[in-house]
Amino acid sequence: MSDAPMPVGRPASTDVGGVAVSIAGWLHGVLLAGFMLYTFVGTRPFADASVAERVEGSPFDRLAVFGLFLLALVTLVVHHRATLSLFIRNLPLVAFTGFCFASMLWSDYPGLTLRRALLLVFLTTIAAGIAASLQDLRRFHSWWFVGLTGVMLVNLIGTALWPGVAITDIGVRGLYTQKNVAGLVAMITVICGVTWMLGVTRSRSVGLGLLMLLPALLFLVITKSKTSIGLTGVAVMAIAVFACAEWLGARFVLLMIALGFLAVNALLGLFAVYDFDVDALLTATLGDASFTGRDELWAFALRSAQERFWLGHGYGAFWDVGLAADPLQRLEPGTWLGDVEIGTINQAHNGYLELWLHVGLPATIAAALIVAAGVVSGMAQAIAGPLSRSSRAAIGFLTMLLLLYLLHNLTEATLFMRGSVFSNIAVLCLFVLSRGRDFAVRSGRA
């Protein structure tokens, strides 16, 4: 007999563990890809939704969301420990989502509220599944940049192939239903790319990032979405200031504070020139004090919200309730809003007024505070957290999106609105940011 040692194979537990990790990674990848496809491409790209379809909803959307929801449930079970921690940290968000669902009890249209609140619940669960299974912030950030760049290329190619569908009189809408959504997606892509480049360590990667940004910048410009173009400029400047503050130190921070005070004084001086008349100042600087007719719509939405001050009309139960019951039917002809074709307008063009219409003022304030708390948490992690540079860049991307979400809802209505692009992303951002300490612990162990 030989005295040579017996060959030692890998323990069965190691093999099982490797398979489990592989399955978990596969679930996360499929769920993230499905979420991004649904959010940024949809089930019917380059198609218009009729008023009737907006009321009933798309069966393709229901099928896609339900499939992703089931996959998210499996993912949450697989990552049950992270799931429990995730939901404890996000109890206000979970409670708000539950309140939206409960609003069917006092809704003007309980059936519509049930369907639309369920969509919100499903999408929230999908976002939770992605966040609970997330293992690497840098990889997550990179896949977003690659995926969004692909979406930009699809939009540009589609616009070239079907200009009659993708180009409108007021701007390019691409594969979306309107130019504002197209501009929003382009804005998100630019912010994703700029923050991604802050996390790289090689100059070659910076060049690649700049090249990948070109389609997004081109598409953003041709959408002519003033809101998205303006917010993109503000965001890029803010990111540049934060990056320079990190590189140059306290003197640069003091310089920026001084410039901020000068800007405030200049703004006050400008107000004084126009006798503190906001309308006159807006007309002189923007050329339109009505924000393209939004002031009349805002006044109508405010009056309607005050009718149900505390609890709202029910989640999803104000607009898109059928032509006969459309809220604009109450208006007398003779005004811009009263003469608009019924069914054309289906939002208040202000996310805070819109959510007030749906679930009341207290819940709207709570929703805004939930997002604001996410911004504060993200800023703390990005500026002073123990994460690596690339991970802090990813955190900065998510934080900037939440900040833009609050600003964007001053002129558009996406604040926790079911199925809207920005709402889907904001919920995911909140979940991922709440797990920042988990990634910090891993970074410390590495």
Image: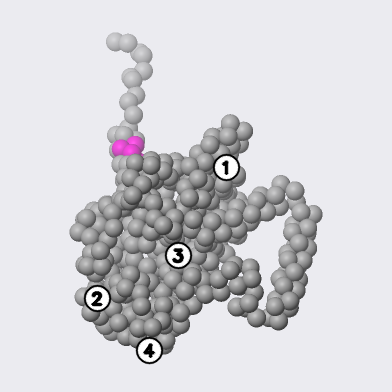
- The amino acid marked with disc number 2 is Leu
The answer to which of marks 4 and 2 sits earlier in the sequence is 4
Residue 218 is tagged as none
Element under disc 4: helix
Indicate which disc, 1 or 4, sits on the residue closer to the N terminus: 1
Q: Which element type, helix, strand or loop, lies under badge 3? A: helix
Q: Mark 4 points at which residue?
A: 307
Tell us which disc is closer to us: 4 or 2.
Answer: 2
**Residue 442 visible to the viewer:** no
Q: Which residue is drawn at 44% across and 58% down?
A: 170
Residue at mark 3 to residue at mark 4: CA–CA distance: 34 Å
- Label 3 vs label 2: CA separation? 42 Å
Which amino acid does the dot numbered 3 rest on?
Arg
Residues in magenta, as a range: 18-22
The residue that disc 1 covers is: 197
Q: Examine the rendering and report whether any part of residue 412 can be seen.
A: yes
Task: Using the image as rendered, state which of residue 11 and residue 270 is in the foreground.
Answer: 270
Disc 1/disc 4 C-alpha distance (Å)? 49 Å
Q: How crowded is mark 1: few (under 14 residues within 10 Å), some or many (20 or more)?
A: many
The reply, left or right, for residue 65 in relation to residue 157 is left
The residue beneath circle 3 is 89
Residue 24 among magenta residues: no
Looking at the rendered structure, the secondary structure element under dot 2 is loop
In the picture provided, is 5 more to the left or to the right than 286? left
Tell me where residue 356 appears, x and y as whole percent. Answer: 41, 79
Mark 4 is surrounded, within 10 Å at the Cα level, by few (under 14), some (14 to 19) or many (20 or more) other residues, namely few
